[in-house]
């Protein structure tokens, strides 16, 4: 097992460069950092924060005369949109329970009631009322005038003008930072002043304080260089907000305040702390940890008390069709807490107990929202990860297994996404989710220098379960796949890096339970899907899609969602309308294939199922669940057929019990909308006409018809040797509007006329709601059977020649196999009866 990782190359030079950039390169603030990124020829950015030089942004910051009062007014307006009914000016709207829909309503209310024109993107970027107030005032400038109704009574306060050395961004950060030399709040990680470094003047790490653990020889995985390289003249040099970059630098410095620790014992874990167990991936990982290890799992669940936390965990598992049995509860301890709070919201006593008793920490919890900004997500995704690192480094040495994301590569134009490749340029990550994942993983890599064993696992899109169909309705991959199937269009993309949740969970648990796998980076992305793969899979399932360019597809999808709103796809509509989220989608769809050499070697060494493409067969159960929930649309008989052929029959019918001497014939077209229809239902659609003078002088039209292949597995209803091959059920309409029904059956018998059995159909005909009035038999002529039903097969003309041949062969192979099984059944039953006759009959048996 160790051989899998020992061959990984060392990137010493990239590591040094990455460390320099991560730390700010010698005391760099955000302006100096951006100066390193900009090319000399690049124009200065425009906007309220722009200036002619790196320091001019601060100098041009307008005076904010009523920051406190305006923040209080925004907080008061936000309160009704929250579960608690109120919001502090320094609290984040989303952290307080606000939703994306609530944010939209809040923006409209602020403009309607207060006259504040605040963009929705600003709310998603930083949803603290004080930050919104500062940003609005800095944009409006000294001419900002609001009516008195904008401020709750007693809240109007004129603040002193900002000094030339204080930027609005710095003022926004003030509540979240700790000044140098100030003791941090107990249980929190002290935050360095932005732009300062925890290094000595010589650039070396300070000696460990007396009594602390010495720095062990770190177990060095291949270091991924985090570089910010100068952009070329035809690409924007920065997409991230300057204040977000400044906050990222400050957050990275938190890792340097982590405790020093030593290498943990290389033993499979027995006591595991798991966060995110109520989420999609976390819930599956909880069950896999219980199935494939002897560990007792402590689940941190956000709730007011243990009873509420236990109920929330049980509801989450049941929603994903996972067991919540007494055996599961016996091996799980539920801890009410919150990753956003100091010490995870646990008491000091419980924190210390866990620090000394746990032997593994698994961080899955994260705020996944592609619309919110870094400031809004950092508490959950960055500070929460560092708090878990603090717990892992405190007391008993233990590894930290961090679920990251390939979102750390989400830069438009990036060329490689390997497990050891450099991340995206942080200033080119525009989505807050991408930025927080980048910052968390970079900070945890710096924690490795303190001796902490950190394993980073990066899933891509997490698809539905291949057996249960459980899926994450808020996952971008699920939303896109739902839209592909619903609208029958797909945007042109390079690769979809997605894998089913059951495979991702199983591999992640394999890493956690194998000590030799700890401390390295893994890609849990499976086998990427190309555009051709997706189009072919959907065509095979009867969903023929049209490929559009990204802008055309986005416009078309938004128009359809507006014309026919789908509540379950509301989040996708908001993503497609957000400029920030659009950059994320563009990077996702235009990015390269993620490679997973180390993960593939690990999977083989552990004997786990190898990665397979998340194809139509793997998505089958998920698509059924999506259709049930209204997110997707499965192929329907009203769709253009995937494959069809003709069938003609001739024969006679007569009154029930009388000779069948009246001519009767049918000219039918049998078709299927998709292969899914065959595999799932074993049903063929029927259209055409019935000609029978005993029913009506004019032909009757098939209004609706189905043919069921080997219904009930061909098992006869009574003792006998007639096994069902096919059952026809037709609804007919005559020229006068009268309604009729027809039911026909093909049976297999243990007789020599096998060829006729496949062509003969016994039929019954009657008026709708009445018993059968006519009965008889019709037969497919021998000369037309091969001509119509084999040589005459037609396939959707939109398919390529190769796809048409594959469709024909697939149908013939499947139908031939089913008919063969049906014809063999009676002979096998007859053979069994003959063998049975050779033994002595018991008193309880009766002859047939």
Image (cartoon, rainbow, N blue to C red):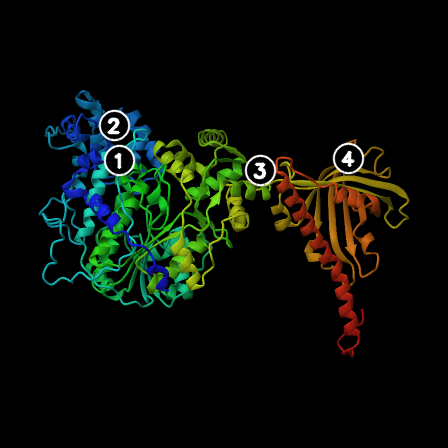
Which residue in the protein does label 3 denote? Answer: 544
Which numbered dot is residue 230? 1
Q: Single out the mark in the foreground, 4 or 3.
A: 3
Q: Nearer the viewer, residue 662 or 183?
A: 183
Task: Give coordinates of residue 145: x percent, y percent.
Answer: 20, 21
User: Looking at the image, do the residues carrying marks 2 and 4 touch, with CB atoms under 8 Å apart?
Assistant: no
Identify the residue at the far top of this view. Answer: 143
Task: Give coordinates of residue 715: x percent, y percent.
Answer: 71, 59
**Does dot 2 land on a helix, a strand or a loop?**
loop
**Does dot 4 land on a helix, a strand or a loop?**
loop
Mark 2 or mark 4, which has the lower sequence index? 2
Query: Marks 1 and 4, how far apart in space?
Result: 78 Å
Q: Nearer the viewer, residue 465 or 783?
A: 783
Task: Give coordinates of residue 536: x percent, y percent.
Answer: 56, 42
Which residue in the protein does label 4 denote? Answer: 738
**Does dot 1 land on a helix, a strand or a loop?**
loop
Query: Marks 1 and 3, how far apart in space?
Result: 44 Å
- Check the picture and name the quadrant holding the N terminus: bottom left
Q: Nearer the viewer, residue 539 or 319?
A: 539
């Amino acid at each position: 097992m160790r051989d899998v990782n020992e061959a990984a190359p060392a990137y010493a030079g990239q590591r040094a460069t990455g460390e320099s950039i991560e730390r700010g390169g010698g005391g760099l603030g955000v302006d100096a950092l951006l100066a390193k990124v900009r090319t000399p020829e690049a124009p200065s950015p425009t906007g309220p924060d722009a200036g002619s030089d790196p320091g001019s942004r601060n100098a041009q910051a307008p005076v904010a005369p009523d920051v406190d009062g305006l923040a209080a007014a925004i907080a008061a307006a936000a309160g009704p949109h929250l579960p608690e009914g109120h919001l502090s000016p320094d609290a984040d709207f989303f952290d307080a329970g606000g939703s994306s829909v609530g944010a939209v309503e809040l923006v409209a209310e602020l403009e309607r009631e207060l006259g504040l024109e605040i963009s929705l993107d600003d709310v998603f970027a930083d949803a603290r009322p004080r930050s919104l107030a500062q940003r609005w005032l800095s944009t409006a400038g000294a001419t900002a005038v609001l009516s008195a109704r904008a401020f709750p009574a007693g809240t109007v306060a004129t603040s002193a003008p900002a000094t030339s050395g204080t930027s609005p961004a710095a003022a926004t950060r003030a509540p979240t930072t700790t000044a140098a030399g100030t003791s941090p709040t107990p249980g929190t990680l002290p935050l360095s002043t932005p732009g300062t470094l925890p290094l000595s003047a010589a650039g070396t790490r300070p000696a460990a304080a007396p009594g602390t653990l010495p720095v062990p020889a770190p177990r060095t995985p291949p270091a991924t260089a985090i570089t910010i390289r100068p952009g070329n003249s035809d690409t924007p040099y920065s997409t991230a907000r300057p204040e977000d970059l400044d906050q990222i630098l400050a957050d990275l410095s938190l890792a340097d305040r982590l405790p020093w620790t030593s290498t943990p014992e290389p033993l499979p874990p027995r006591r595991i702390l798991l966060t995110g167990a109520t989420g999609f991936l976390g819930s599956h990982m909880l069950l896999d940890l219980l199935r494939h290890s002897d560990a007792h799992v402590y689940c941190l669940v956000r709730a007011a008390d243990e009873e509420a936390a236990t109920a929330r965990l049980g509801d989450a598992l049941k929603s994903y069709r996972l067991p919540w049995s007494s055996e599961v509860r016996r091996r799980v301890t539920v801890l009410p807490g919150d990753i956003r709070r100091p010490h995870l919201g646990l008491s000091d006593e419980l924190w210390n107990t866990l620090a000394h008793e746990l032997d593994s920490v698994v961080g899955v919890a994260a705020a996944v929202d592609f619309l919110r900004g870094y400031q809004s997500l950092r508490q959950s995704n960055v500070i929460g990860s560092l708090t878990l690192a603090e717990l892992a480094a405190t007391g008993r040495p233990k590894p930290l297994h961090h679920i990251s994301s390939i979102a750390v590569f989400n830069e438009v134009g990036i060329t490689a996404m390997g497990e050891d490749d450099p991340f995206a340029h942080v200033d080119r990550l525009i989505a807050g989710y991408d930025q927080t994942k980048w910052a968390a993983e970079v900070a945890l890599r710096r924690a490795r220098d303190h001796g902490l064993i950190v394993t980073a696992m990066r899933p891509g899109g997490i698809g539905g379960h291949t057996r249960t169909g459980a899926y994450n309705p808020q996952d971008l991959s699920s939303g896109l796949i739902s839209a592909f199937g619903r609208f029958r269009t797909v945007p042109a993309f390079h690769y979809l890096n997605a894998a089913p949740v059951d495979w991702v969970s199983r591999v992640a648990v394999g890493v956690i339970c194998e000590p030799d796998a700890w401390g390295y980076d893994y890609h849990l992305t499976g086998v990427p899907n190309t555009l051709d793969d997706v189009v072919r899979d959907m065509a095979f399932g009867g969903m023929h899609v049209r490929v559009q360019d990204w802008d055309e597809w986005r416009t078309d999808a938004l128009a359809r969602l507006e014309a026919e709103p789908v509540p379950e796809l509301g989040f996708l509509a908001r993503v497609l309308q957000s400029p920030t989220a659009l950059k994320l989608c563009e990077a996702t769809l235009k990015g390269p294939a993620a490679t997973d050499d180390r993960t593939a070697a690990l999977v083989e060494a552990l004997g786990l199922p190898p990665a397979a493409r998340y194809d139509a067969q793997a998505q089958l159960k998920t698509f059924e669940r999506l259709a049930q929930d209204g997110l997707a649309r499965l192929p329907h008989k009203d769709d253009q057929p995937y494959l069809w052929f003709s069938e003609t029959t001739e024969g006679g019918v007569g009154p029930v019990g009388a000779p069948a001497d009246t001519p009767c014939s049918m000219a039918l077209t049998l078709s299927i909308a998709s292969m899914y229809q065959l595999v799932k239902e074993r049903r063929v659609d029927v259209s055409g006409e019935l000609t029978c003078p005993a029913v009506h002088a004019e032909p009757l039209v098939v209004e609706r018809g189905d043919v069921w292949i080997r219904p009930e597995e061909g098992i006869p209803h009574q003792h006998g040797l007639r096994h069902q091959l096919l059952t026809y059920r037709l609804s007919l309409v005559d020229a006068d509007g009268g309604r009729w029904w027809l039911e026909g059956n093909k049976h297999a018998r243990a007789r020599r006329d096998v060829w006729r059995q496949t062509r003969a159909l016994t039929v019954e005909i009657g008026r709708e709601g009445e018993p059968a009035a006519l009965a008889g038999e019709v037969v497919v002529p021998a000369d037309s059977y091969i001509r119509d039903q084999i040589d005459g097969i037609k396939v959707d003309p939109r398919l390529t020649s190769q796809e048409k041949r594959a469709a024909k062969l697939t149908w013939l192979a499947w139908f031939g196999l089913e008919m063969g099984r049906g014809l063999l059944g009676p002979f096998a039953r007859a053979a069994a009866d003959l063998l049975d006759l050779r033994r002595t009959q018991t008193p309880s048996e009766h002859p047939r």
